[in-house]
Amino acid sequence: MADRSVRDQIVDNLHAAIAAIDGTGVYHHAIAQVFRWRTPPPAHLEFPSAVVIDTEERVELQIPLEDRRLSVTVQVIGHGSFEDSGDEGPDDLAREMLADVERAAQVDTTRGGLAVVTIETANRIAVDVPAEPYFVVEVDFEIRYRTAWGDPATEHAG
């Protein structure tokens, strides 16, 4: 069986970091479910749910290694009443969830020693307030890492 790519391992690490948002300590709320992009969610979706989306990677050859810049978006979909939130509205819940995602992703900016650094590049909040309010939080990251030239499964420390 072929070795898993460093990219896959990095995305798994970020997935685990987001799944660790448990509503205790420094976190305001708990993430109910976390999915990787293009993974079908279960029939019953719990809120808030997060999706880790890795869609683009830029590669620059620096023989004997490849410098890689992986773009990843963490998207959280929440419901304005996903917990007893007192007087907080969906705007407040969305801002708190944004802070939780930012915190969780920056606990280990090296993604378990696989990356050079994880950098937040942008974030967005959208709130829809019909009869039952929903919000979407998106946080974009650039994860810089290196692999051996021509071998995406071999980490390169140089």
Image (cartoon, rainbow, N blue to C red):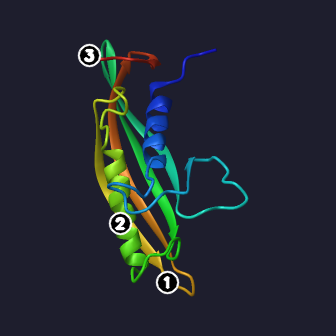
Query: Which residue corresponds to the image point at 30% horizontal and 38% vertical from the top-left?
Result: 109
Dot 2 surroundings within 10 Å: few (below 14), some, or many (20 or more)?
some
- Picture quadrant of residue 42: bottom right
Depth check: 86 or 63 in front? 86
Residue 22: % across, % down: 45, 53
Q: Disc 3 marks which residue?
A: 158
Q: CA distance from mark 1 to mark 3?
A: 50 Å
Q: Is 66 located above or below residue 22 in the figure? A: above
Q: Is 139 located above or below residue 57 in the figure? A: below
Query: Which residue corresponds to the image point at 30% horizontal and 45% vertical from the top-left?
Result: 106
Which one is closest to the eye, mark 1 or mark 2?
A: 2
Which one is closest to the eye, mark 2 or mark 3?
A: 2
Query: Which residue corresponds to the image point at 43% horizontal and 62% vertical from the top-left?
Result: 29
The N terminus lies in quadrant: top right
- Picture quadrant of residue 49: bottom right
Q: CA distance from mark 1 to mark 2?
A: 17 Å
Dot 1 surroundings within 10 Å: few (below 14), some, or many (20 or more)?
some
User: In the image, what residue type sits under mark 2?
Assistant: Glu
- Picture quadrant of residue 91: bottom left
Q: Residue furthest top?
A: 64
Query: Contact (CB < 8 A) between labels 1 and 3?
Result: no
Which one is closest to the eye, mark 1 or mark 3?
A: 1
Q: Disc 2 marks which residue?
A: 96
User: Of the residues under marks 1 and 2, which one precedes in the sequence?
Assistant: 2
Residue 35: % across, % down: 57, 48
